[in-house]
Amino acid sequence: MNNIINIANARIQKGIVTENLDLIGSKLKTEIQKKFARSLFLREVDTGSCGACESEIISAINPVYDLQRFGVDFVASPRHADALLVTGPVSLNMSLALKRTYEAMPSPKFVITAGDCALDGGPFKGSYYIEGGVSKIIPVVFHIPGCPPKPIDLVLALLLAVKNLKRS
Amino acid sequence: MKYLEFKIAVLERTGLDERAFRESGSEIYIAANLENFHGICLLLHSILSSPVMLYFAEDNVKTSGVYTLRCGFLGKKIQRWVFVVVDIPKDNLNFPAISKDIVSAQLFEREIKEMFGLIPAGSPDVRRLRLHDEVWPDGYFPLRKEFVKPEKTNNTGKYYVFDRIEGEGVFEVPVGPVHAGIIGPGHFRFSVAGEPIINLELRLGFAHRGAEKLFEGKSAKEAQIFSECISGDAAFAHSLAFSLAVEQAAGIDVKENVKINRAIGLELERIYNHINDIGGMAIDVAFSYSSTLASIVKENILRLNEKLSKHRYLKGSNGVGQCALIKDKESRVCLLEVLSGAKTDIDLLKNILFSSVSFMDRVDTTGTLHRKTAEDFGVTGLAGRASGLELDLRRVFPGIYEKTSFEIIRGDKGDVLSRLNVRFNELAVALRVITELSGQINFSGKEDSPEAIIISGTGLGAVEGWRGPIIYWVKIGKEGKIERCKIVDASFNNWQALSCCVHGNIIPDFPVCNKSFDFSYSGGDL
């Protein structure tokens, strides 16, 4: 098993092109410590994205980026979440589910959106079957642009989002 | 069977005139009428032994007062797409359903009904597919040309009714549309007695965004970019299928280097997705170490993609008549270096998984999709091949693959293990094919492809994406604008495989069954 771990380690070291990651990450960790006393739990909701945003969010928790070490984790239920991370242009079929997921979260709570679709429909703007943006359904405090946003952008954006949070 | 033999057989058995055949590249269009449409479809289904591959309507009311229906089959031996074409007059919207005889036509006819308001007479299932009853009022058909969006959607007061399985101790487990993982939206309704699943009903459409309608009125260039947003993890394959369709419609020739680059892009996409799903299967039976290793391999390929195309998912790297991923010798060296690292890791991963008894115990004989079921539902691609079906578009229309050692990979048992094996073997083939093709790129000739001129016409483009066939049928109008674009992602019909394969399995094994297919929510819902 040790041998295997070494090989995996070698791969991680080799692939890294993001020296900034540790710097941004440690700031994020400090900020989360300050605002949440320990960690930030996110619940991800896909309202009809193409799947690329999901793929990048999953990438952010792979061992290369390892978002969890900065105090952010993804939970399986809105009841356990501090915030929602929402992708997609909100298909009409998803608007009720999105609203109910938001309502199921305990307060205080907030919403971050990721990917161009979630802002205003993005490439699907003008379609007969989308709401055209998450903020039409629930209040959004921060948006992460990109098609899809890269994992490093997600980390940076989370830092900005947490920094911007005001006590309400 | 040669094409000529096929043609003679069809002419003899239908009594059609030879003028009913129109040939265009690898597409054959057979003109039918409402009386013989059903019979010709059944005949093609049986002599080509093909499921319905794509089946769609088009609104020609403005120009000729009819809706045109095209039902397409794939002739593997004759290497042709064969369509039966029938016109439906606008004042009588009924047409004879073929879904009562061909199961693989079922979802297509439901789609035609909800999108155009055409009525498949005699169809066993005419419920809506994607426009959910709860939010969409009756009488609005989005793909008609004169469609106007309803003023009020949501809260129609109607509800979808699930099949109820009744009996002592039977209970239901509803899951979704918001799932526990980071994944697309869909609803699964399990009926369970004790441990085993008796019935699984899928309700999809939650990712429906009206993609086909949005294609209309776009220029080929705009539509190209848009096609990359249909299914994000198959962005390259979708974009490639779209450009092939436009090239066929406008009669554009593609250079050898472009073909090589496209095959490389397609295989790169296959590699990162197969490795992702192998990792997913491991995590779904709580074998997290191996899934972590898989995620590192995937990350390395995504970074390679970014180096080659400036985008981690290869978006923007393909265009009509154009594709340049490996532009110089340095990028080829980089490609081969990353892939050789990936190969070492994949071998290691395979070793870890196959030497773990508890992992093998979870995947062996789990989620079996029988060959006959797969055949009836028109299951294609990886899912079909793991159940023993021999269908791979890279084999039917080899193109540039002829110059490689490509081989079709199949399984026989149709269980999760079969699909795992097919993925590992396809990974090996993909790595080999890329290495071979990258050696054939010609860097010396600085042959700039001129900007392609788009003329009006229709064309079909199909590629074997990593899930299976992705098919685009495109009609371009006089001003070079898209008038109709029909998309069939392999996931559309393949989703039905999932509800068939879980019978008798336990709910805790459902995630690994699901991941072993990994169908696209957005690709199926459009």
Image (cartoon, rainbow, N blue to C red):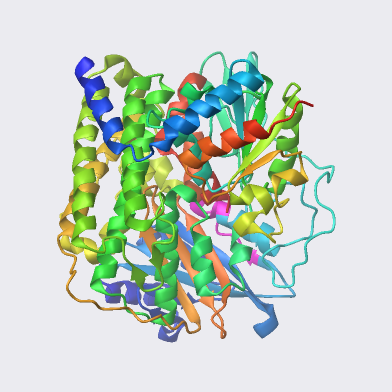
In this picture, is A31 found above or below B445? above
Q: Quadrant of the N terminus of chain B?
A: bottom left
Residue B39 relative to residue B6: left or right? right
Q: Quick one: B378 or B179, which is closer to the camera? A: B179
In this picture, is B504 found above or below B237? above
At a point 48% along the width and 36% down the height, the residue shown is B498
Q: Position of residue B57 (x, y in %)?
A: 59, 67
Q: Quadrant of the C terminus of chain B?
A: bottom right
At a point 68% along the width and 20% down the height, the residue shown is A79
At a point 74% along the width and 44% down the height, the residue shown is A135
At a point 29% along the width and 73% down the height, the residue shown is B3
Q: Position of residue B464 (x, y in %)?
A: 35, 55
Query: From this viewpoint, is residue A76 visible?
Result: no
Q: Position of residue B519 (x, y in %)?
A: 47, 42
Q: Quick one: B39 or B58, which is closer to the camera? A: B58
Whether the magenta-drawn stretch holds residue B97 is answered as: yes
Residue B386 falls in image quadrant: top left
The magenta region covers B95-107
Q: Number of numbered discs present?
A: 0
Whether the magenta-drawn stretch holds residue B101 is answered as: yes
Q: Quick one: B168 or B142, which is closer to the camera? A: B142
Q: Position of residue A5 (x, y in %)?
A: 26, 20
In this picture, is B49 found above or below A66? below
Query: From this viewpoint, is residue B89 visible?
Result: yes
Residue B33 falls in image quadrant: bottom right
